[in-house]
Image (spheres, rainbow, N blue to C red):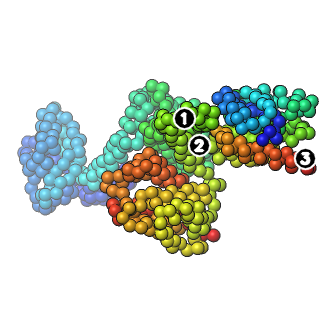
Amino acid sequence: MSKKNVFSIASTKDETSLLNFIQEAATIGTWQVDLDTMLTYWSDVTKHIHQVPNDFQPTVETGISFYKEGFSRNKIKTVFDRCVKHAENFDLELQIVTAKGQEKWVRAIGMPILKNGVVHKVYGAFQDIDEKTRTAKKVSSSEEQFRKTFEFALVGMGLLDLTGTWININTSLRKTLGYSFEEMKTLTLQDISYPEDKDSLINAMRNIVENRISNYQTETRYLNKFGQTIWALLSLSLVRNNINEPLHFVAQIQDITSQKDATEKLKQLLKTSEDQNKRLLNFTHIVSHNMRSHYSNLKMLSNIIEIDTPETTQNQEFSLMKDAIENLGETIENLNKVIVVNKTKEEDFEAVNLRSMVEKVITNINALITTNQAITRINIDKNLNVLVVAAYLESIILNLLTNAIKYKSPDRPLEISISAKLKKNKAIIEFKDNGLGVDLCLHGKKLFGMYKTFHDHEEARGLGLFLTKNQIKAMGGKITIKSKVDVGTSFLIHLKHETN
Amino acid sequence: MKQIDITCIIDDDPIFVYGTRKIMEMADFSNAFMVYKNGKEALENLKPILKQEKNIPDVILLDINMPIMDGWQFLDEFIKVKTKKPITIFVVSSSIDPQDIEKAKKYSIVKDYILKPISPDMLTVISKKIVESKNLGNST
């Protein structure tokens, strides 16, 4: 309602009712105190705000006592006093407690009326501003909440104007970049970007402003104040107003330098161990290769001595030397087999019929089986094929069979049974004997180690199970053992089943 | 024996050369020996011999691992040289690497891969194979 209208109405209507009308409309009441008589007047609206009945008779003291104890009451006392004594106006926002016990924000306005230079009346207005104040307080509290969230967020956050200049940045980001707030305000996001990452950032900013993309996320690098490279995850988006004009950018920058460093370290470690592995393989290859040529020379020379001067070989030393040469040769050969296993390639694999292979090995060592009076039983489906390196499978079967024969029990005839079953896409092959058995509690952990022997046996060389395990692993399988001393041993081998 | 006139040994290991010669002499394997320390030395000397068609070796025992020019490089060069008299080549190595054995088999001029050391028994086998391929060469 404009002032002009108020006056036009005022000129035609009764003055009091107009005043009341305005008061009600604006929830503004009036009051006055005659200092000579101390008579106090409250308008209806003022009474209504105080939640007192219309016949309520206020005094200065009761008026003041409605103000909330503490700041509000003290303040009104002071300003009213100053108004009376020094003729000072007042206009304050204070809290009262109404007759019904309700807390309310009010605006209290006071103005002195002078007569002969002395204050003899105080006039005032009284407005209920509770709802307005509460809403304002709510807004400022939610703004405060947002400000705190922004400030204390662990992820680095910042606001940028459309040129990329920082408007505001939070603590986390200041820490990451090492700049103070004042320093940051003179910089742009582009300024702190790693030189090589700058172009794509500028492109992205343009694309966002021109609405081609809604946001931009990337792993990028920054240079902090101390020139250190910071790896970060940047999420950049744009705030627009309600008519879709771009206002400012919101950037979230998460420092991932430590993760990057860890990944880098891991990569380095992997490369180092790969290199070492390669060198080791090379080294073993060279050693075994070179050692083998020396061994072959030794063997040849001992052969020559035997033919050329047989009389010098009729002693224990010569025969021991010949044994030593033989052992050297065998060790080198085993070492070579391990190296070969470690070089297994995809194309070495083929489908092999398990039963035929077992039968072939048994035929090959038939003499050994017969001499030891061993009984072999085969229980393998004749259609069962496994995906293996044929030479390894042969070597594994041979090794396990000769092991069983080597470590047979002197107390009972040796029985070896070889069976196979399918489980999912694996073929599980069992080699079971009734031989000496192995104490797994004692030797379980090192059973498949290099050069470990568990029987006091002249033929035990120790590399057999190590090689077997390596061959099985190279074919993507596994081997486990169950054994009981003086009952027997059972090896379980898991291999890939070939379906076609 | 003595069906073999000249044996050529290409090997950088003096102990191997000494021992092999000795075993061959004891077994009366051949009349004469030619010894070269590496593939390059062998190639340079064998080329003029093959041209003159005089004193051409019946058999070459070729090592793989040698300095300057190894056995493989020698083979790659030697297959380009024309010869009227058939020469039997054996790769003789201490390597038991399956890759080496496979590679040797790929050369058609290589008769066989022999694992060092060469024993008297092995000599008999080698001798037999040389005669075999000599006769084969004569008949064609």
Q: Distance between the residues labelled 2 and 1?
A: 88 Å
Horizontal and vertical percent position of residue B121: 67, 44
**Quadrant into which the N terminus of chain A falls:** bottom left
For the residue pair A139 and A416, the one nearer the viewer reads as: A416
Do the residues bearing badges 2 and 3 touch, measured as CB atoms within 8 Å? Answer: no
Q: Residue at x 90, y 31 (%)?
A: B54
| Residues packed near mark 2 inside 10 Å, few (<14), some (14 to 19) or many (20 plus) | some
Can the viewer see residue A418 in this picture? yes
Horizontal and vertical percent position of residue A306: 59, 36
Horizontal and vertical percent position of residue B56: 86, 34
Q: What residue does disc 3 label?
A: B138
Q: What residue type is labelled 2?
A: Ala
Q: What residue does disc 2 label?
A: A204
- Does dot 1 land on a helix, a strand or a loop? helix
| Residues packed near mark 3 inside 10 Å, few (<14), some (14 to 19) or many (20 plus) | few
Can the viewer see residue A430 in this picture? no
Q: What residue type is labelled 1?
A: Thr
Quarter of the image where one finds residue A185 = top left
Q: What residue does disc 1 label?
A: A313
